[in-house]
Image: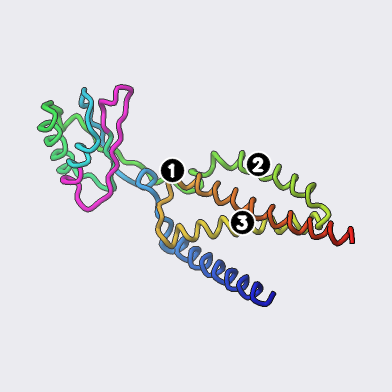
């Protein structure tokens, strides 16, 4: 028992340390957002023909060195490319257009192509669409736990469940902040995965405790 207690304390201290460091980084440096959610520049080129993303990436790597670039096919026929980067100057735009004209044998006019400013997307705006369904699901799950494990002390179990779920999510976000994992499309699935795994762990533990209580009562 002492060994288990010692391991539990070590794990708890590590989790607290990770959360504290993660919160410090979040409030000082900030979270690392995926390029599509950062303040950035974009430009669209209507090629009027299909193209290979790899070819466009090769051009942008040459014209926009030392920065992350996102290439997207847009429009139904995928004949328009959107280039998203942290910074695109007029000179870089012109060089990219000239390279694309040379590569595909077309005659795009640099003066007709605009560089658009993409504002930074706040973290709260990313998670906002998920708050209501997430909240409803959580309430239903807590109701089930309250009914299923009421013999273990309903309010005590509910409080522990909410706290453990919160700690799991804080730990995940802290790890993302420390490791500089970008906040992007994989963030919500990752949050949901940790949420489900936490619930599995909690219910497994509660089932064990409920079984032990029934065995004691039978004796």
Which sits earlier in the primary sequence, circle 2 or circle 3? 2
Which sits earlier in the primary sequence, circle 1 or circle 3? 3
Q: Residue at x 16, y 38 (%)?
A: 96
Colouring mode (rainbow / by chain / secondary structure / one colour): rainbow
Residue 93 sits in which quadrant?
top left
- Percent position (x, y) of residue 138? 66, 45
Q: Secondary structure at mark 2?
A: helix
Task: Tell me the tag on residue 185.
Answer: 1
- Percent position (x, y) of residue 139? 70, 44
Q: Which residues are magenta?
A: 60-81
Q: How many marks?
A: 3
- Percent position (x, y) of residue 141? 70, 45
Residue 171 sits in which quadrant?
bottom right
| 3 is higher (above) or lower (below) than 214 | below
Q: Residue at x 55, y 58 (%)?
A: 170
Crowd tier of the residue under label 3, counting other residues whose Cα lies within 10 Å: few below 14, some 14–19, many 20 or above:
some
* Inter-mark Cα distance, 1 to 2: 21 Å
Crowd tier of the residue under label 1, counting other residues whose Cα lies within 10 Å: few below 14, some 14–19, many 20 or above:
few
Question: Is 194 on the left or on the right of 68, as rendered?
Answer: right
Which sits earlier in the primary sequence, circle 1 or circle 2? 2
């Amino acid at each position: 028992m002492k060994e288990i207690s010692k391991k539990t304390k070590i794990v708890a201290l590590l989790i607290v340390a990770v959360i504290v460091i993660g919160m410090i980084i979040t409030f000082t440096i900030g979270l690392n957002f995926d390029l599509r959610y950062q303040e950035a520049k974009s430009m669209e080129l209507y090629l009027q023909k299909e193209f290979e993303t790899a070819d466009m990436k090769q051009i942008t790597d040459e014209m926009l060195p030392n920065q992350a670039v996102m290439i997207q096919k847009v429009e139904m026929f995928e004949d328009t490319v959107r280039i998203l980067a942290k910074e695109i100057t007029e000179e870089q735009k012109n060089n990219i257009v000239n390279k694309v004209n040379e590569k595909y044998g077309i005659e795009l006019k640099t003066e007709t192509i605009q560089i658009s400013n993409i504002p930074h997307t706040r973290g709260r705006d990313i998670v906002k669409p998920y708050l209501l369904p997430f909240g409803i699901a959580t309430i239903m799950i807590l109701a089930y736990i309250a009914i299923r494990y009421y013999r273990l002390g309903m309010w005590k179990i509910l409080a522990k469940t909410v706290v453990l779920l919160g700690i799991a999510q804080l730990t995940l976000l802290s790890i993302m902040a420390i490791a500089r994992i970008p906040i992007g499309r994989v963030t919500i699935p990752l949050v949901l995965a940790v949420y489900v795994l936490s619930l599995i762990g909690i219910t497994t533990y509660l089932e064990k405790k409920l079984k032990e209580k029934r065995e004691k009562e039978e004796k």
